[in-house]
Each structure stands twice: as structure tokens, then as C-alpha cells.
Amino acid sequence: MTITSDELVTWISAYFWPFVRITALLMASPFFGTMAIIPARIRMVLALALTWVLVPVIPPAPVIDPLSAVGLLVLAQQLLFGFAMGFLLQLAFTALTLGGSSISMPMGLGFANVIDPQNGVQVPVLSTLFTIMGTLLFLSLNGHLILIQVLADSFTSMPVGPVGLSTENLMRIVLWGTRVFVGGVLIALPAIMIITLINISFGIMTRAAPQLNIFAVGFPTTMAAGFLVLFLTMPNLLPHFTSLLYDAFDVMQSILTGG
């Protein structure tokens, strides 16, 4: 049996272009792209498995030589599209990191840094706690399944080709980044307000009775109050983080449909 170069390019194009987009998404998305949770080899096997499952149900990819000039352009577009979808979800998790950092500083835990399993950098311990909670909520809400569904739909609304994301869509992704700060503030606002009121109370006591050693009791009191506030306000994490996730998926859908 002889295989011509055209047949070889056809077989490669059918699986290679979807594989590029899927791999880029898995590398940039939360949970799937976390080295501490899913090693690189497992992620590659998962990308191959998703490609094998999705290729029969998505529109066939065009026959484009990967080594041609058009092939390099298509490669860049598929990488950009996968990274853009994963980046939107990463912004939702960044709001958790920002909220944890905002609480850690007035609470007195700003010096307690650990490695964030999501991003691989040092962050305050509360940011890591919020990130772990957000990952569990993401899985409990079937966010990983929704992400795979959005990925499968993307091959229908934005098929493989040299034309990818427009400048308007890229600007929409950038502008949605402002939700990171809004979400982080909403998550941290109750704890920040209460801890700030406690610090103001200690400041008034220091001015009223300078001979008292307020700092000896202020630090443990602030930290204990912070943990109490976190315990009481932790249920508020679910609606705020759920809203961020749904907004991220809505932005993905609007970009896919061109709305």
C-alpha cells in the first residue's frame, strides 16, 4: 500500500489542528493547567484523548500543510484561541488570589507565603486557601465539563482556518479583566471592613491610653477576628465565584457566536 503526500497531509490535518487548540486550552486553563495537580505527561495524554473523541463529532479540519506559510498562520491562530479561552478562566481564579491577598495584609498574615499550586508562585496563605476552595467549587459545578463543551462548540462557530480572533474580541477579553478586581474586592470586602474597624478601635484606645501596650494584644486579636470573619463569610465565596465563572463562560460564548 502506497501513501501519497496529499493523503498524509489530509490525515495529519484532521487531528493535528484540533490537537493544537485543545492542547493550548489545557495548558492555559485552571485545574487542567496546574502542574501540581496534572503533570505534563498526563495533560498530553488527556489532550490526545480529547482530540480522538472530538474529531468524529466536529466539522472536519481543512487540509493545510503544517509546514507551509498558511499552516504557520493557522498554528498561531489555534494557539491564540486556546490560550484566550483558558486565560478567561484564569482571570476568575486570579480574583480569588487577589481577595486572599487583600485580607492577609490587614489581618497580619501577609508574611505567611506558600507556593500557589495554580500558578507556581508565592502568594499569601489565604490566597492559596481561596484557590483550593475555588478549584473544588469549579469541579463541583461541573466547570471542567462545561469547558470541554465550549471547546467542542468552538470548532463549529470558529472552525480551523487562518482567520481567528478579531481585534474586537481580543479587546473584549482584556476589558473583562476588570472583573478580576471587582470580584476580588467583593470576596474580601466583609473581612476588610471588620478588620479595619478593629484596627481603628485599637488606634483610638492607643490615643486615649498611651501607657497601654496595645500592640501586645492587637496582633493576636486582629488575627483571631480575621479567622472568625473568614468562617462567617466563607459561604459568600460560592455566589461571587460562581458569578465570575458564569461571566467567563458567557464571554466565551459571545466571542464564539460573534455577539
Image (tube, helix red, strand yellow):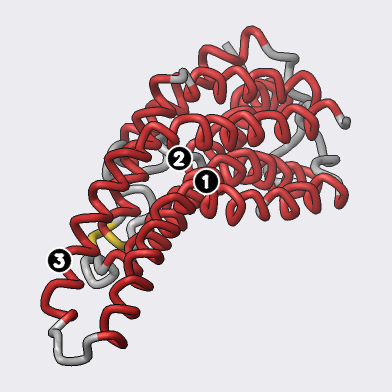
| Label 3 packing within 10 angstroms: few (<14), some (14-19), many (20+) | few
Q: Secondary structure at mark 1?
A: helix
Label 2, on which residue?
Answer: 30
Find out whether the residues at labels 3 and 2 contact each other: C-beta distance under 8 Å: no
Q: Amino acid at mark 1?
A: Gln
| First in residue order: circle 3 vs circle 2 | 2
The answer to whether 230 appears left or right of 251 in the picture is left
The answer to whether 223 appears left or right of 159 in the picture is left
Residue, far top: 57
Find out whether the residues at labels 1 and 2 contact each other: C-beta distance under 8 Å: yes
Residue, far bottom: 211
| First in residue order: circle 1 vs circle 3 | 1
| First in residue order: circle 1 vs circle 2 | 2
Distance between the alpha carbons at the discs numbered 3 and 2 = 35 Å
Q: Which mark is on residue 90?
A: 1
Label 3, on which residue?
Answer: 220
Q: Which mark is on residue 137?
A: none
**Residue at the (46%, 18%) spot, across then down:** 142
| Label 2 packing within 10 angstroms: few (<14), some (14-19), many (20+) | many
Between circles 1 and 3, the one closer to the viewer is: 3
Q: Where the N terminus falls, by quadrant?
A: top right
Q: Amino acid at mark 2?
A: Pro
| Viewer-proximal residue among 204 and 157 | 204
Q: Position of residue 124 (x, y in %)?
A: 30, 62
The answer to whether 249 appears left or right of 122 in the picture is right
| Viewer-proximal residue among 150 and 198 | 198
Q: How many marks?
A: 3
**Residue at the (83%, 26%) spot, across then down:** 257
